[in-house]
Image (cartoon, rainbow, N blue to C red):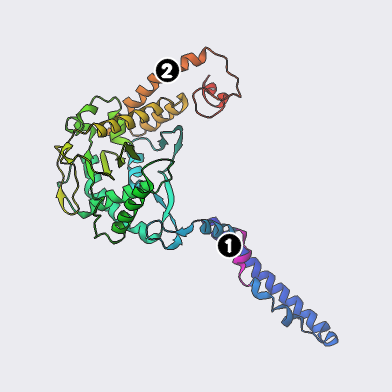
Amino acid sequence: MNEFVRDERLVQKFALTTKWVIRRILRRCEAILGDRCGLSFASQTMRVWPYFRQPKRHSFVTTKLADKEANRTGNCRLCGKSAILRRSHIYPRFIFKWMAGTAAGTFRHAAKPNRPVQDGFKLPLLCHDCEQRFSARETWFARNLFFPFVNDGILPQEYDHNLFYFIISLAWRLTCLPRQAGPPEDLMENVDREWRQFLLNGQEFPKTYDVAHLILCNPDEKAKFAVKQLLSTDNFARYFGRNTDGTLVGWEDNFLVYIKLPCFLFFVPMTPLDERKFVNTRISHGEGNLLNRQEVTDPWITSILQQRASIVDDHWKDLNDRQTEKVRNELLRNPNSHWAKMFWSDVNAAAVRQRPTRQNIQGTKIGRNELCPCNSGKKFKYCCGATR
């Protein structure tokens, strides 16, 4: 930004200097030829000069910035007002800052594990005012629930209406993402209308789609996890303790929004579920208490968790040797971190699982300019071939 300001000042200085030089030349010409021609060059030419009094119109840097702002201008997805749209995080930003500070410094998308990124997914979605509405509830969740639970293992017993607002805001943002298939359009329109009305005023709670479930998943206390069938999952610590995940899930005529944050699971059903299979997981609209003794016996929820955890685990198998070494080096920067130690075993396990594939690759002849068989998308000479 400092470069843009410096370039803008240079343009203004050049415009003022040029204006002064032209004025002196015109006045000199007027003094010499004004009497003969009967014209006042300076007075006639200065009528055109107002176009040059605003050098921003002729500044290339300013034009580029204006085009960038114009591309972000649109209707806010929540309030519908025309404004400059903020690049809103689908998942709260403090999640990624915490993940970067406690283990590896970068993040990896499950679909492209060999391409590290610096921040979570963002989308031009909200105006400034609506972004502040969500930011206030995110700050409340981070200070009162997230950091005490993941850092110190302390679970605050009481919560208020901010928790329900925070969950619905996450679920609503996921429904705004582009999708190829999902729930029927009439159902999505009804859900969007009720949730938007609640998120705008914060007091009129949804009447139909007003159920939200929270499941705690602390890797240090696996015995207390609500879904007992998943305690033997190999990547339990990495998926339930570190990953962020979210999607719209459907089965037959049942639909829900699935949200996964480190150590926190959220289910927001769009169609009724059997509440008898959920013990101490439902979040009330106002004040309530969080209990460690939770239990979920719904087979559909169990299958969702198993499927999502296995998908992430399968993508880790595509991590090539070069990126695996980078992850190890990043973890070694925080050797005393509890989460880094927990993550280290999962990274080594992923490297062991992909080792047979590497041995098969070595038995075939691969051209240097061909794509690497590890599915990294790079040429062989820049990927696995570089290590040889």
| Residue at horizontal 45 percent and vertical 63 percent from the top | 82
> In screen coordinates, is 160 left or right of 10?
left
Question: Regarding mark 2 in the picture, which secondary structure is present there?
Answer: helix
Pointer 2 and pointer 1: residues touching (CB < 8 Å)? no
- Res. 8 mark: 1
Residue holding disc 2: 355
How far across and how far down the image is residue 61, in percent? Answer: 59, 58
| Quarter holding residue 348 | top left
Q: Is residue 276 above or below residue 192?
A: above
How far across and how far down the image is residue 182, in percent? Answer: 38, 41
Amino acid type at image mark 1: Glu
Question: Regarding mark 1 in the picture, which secondary structure is present there?
Answer: helix
**Start-end of magenta stretch:** 53-60
Magenta span: helix, strand or loop, mainly? helix
Q: Is residue 11 above or below residue 303?
A: below
Amino acid type at image mark 2: Arg
